[in-house]
Amino acid sequence: MKRPIAVVLIAASLAAGSLALQRTPAHATTESVVVPAKYRWVAALVKTYFSPMGTATYRKAMCVASLESGFNPNARNSSGAEGVYQFMPRTWSYYSHLAGWGGASAYWAKANVATAAWVVRHHGWSAWSTGWRC
């Protein structure tokens, strides 16, 4: 009698473990994205600019911001990408101008998030296709 119970408990543990392994950052949602307390104001900007495009777009925007910069507006990648949504300088110059934020720094969170939202609205998420999925 004790053996079947142990088998059931092991099977349940394995099942729970396999579910936990499937929940990776590549499948992040607003429920699993953790916004550092000092950057909650940046997350509020993401909500302001992306939620009018729908829940799915807002959730993806939260996930992408989390993976790109951890919501840090001063983030800089070794490749030269800058800001919350990690724009390359040339790309930033082009898109920020089109989005009405020309001349603004990519490190200005409001301009960075607003420009990212403009890009998504007009061109989709292709600029952020880096091999991970949100």
Image (tube, grey):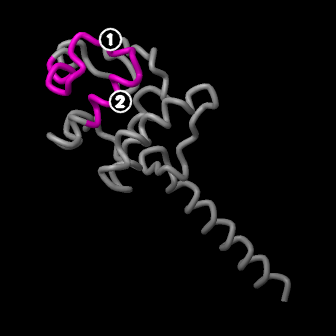
Q: Is residue 71 magenta?
A: no
Quadrant of the rendered image containing residue 4: bottom right
Q: Are there few (<14), some (14-19), or many (20+) residues within 10 Å of tag 1?
A: some
Residue 73 image-quadrant placement: top left
**What is the three-letter code of the residue carrying label 1?**
Ser
Q: Where is mark 1, residue-wise?
A: 105
**Mark 1: secondary structure:** loop
x%, y% of residue 46? 42, 37
The image shows residue 17, relative to residue 108, as above or below, that is: below
- Residue extent of the magenta highlight: 94-117
**For residue 102: magenta?**
yes
- The foreground one among 121 and 61 is 121
In the image, 13 versus 29, the foreground residue is 29
Which image quarter: residue 115? top left
The image position of residue 58, as x and y in percent, is 38, 48
Q: Estimate how packed mark 2 is, as few (under 14), some (14 to 19) or many (20 or more) residues with alpha carbons within 10 Å.
A: many
Q: Which residue is mark 2?
A: 113
Quadrant location of the N terminus in the rendered image = bottom right
Q: Examine the rendered structure and indicate whether residue 9 appears above or below residue 59.
A: below
Location of residue 1 with respect to 34 vertically, above or below: below
Residue at screen point 28% across, 32% down: 116
**Residue appearing at x 58%, y 40% in the figure:** 34
Outermost residue toward the right? 2
Q: Amino acid at mark 2?
A: Val
* Relative image position of residue 42 (x, y in whole percent): 49, 30
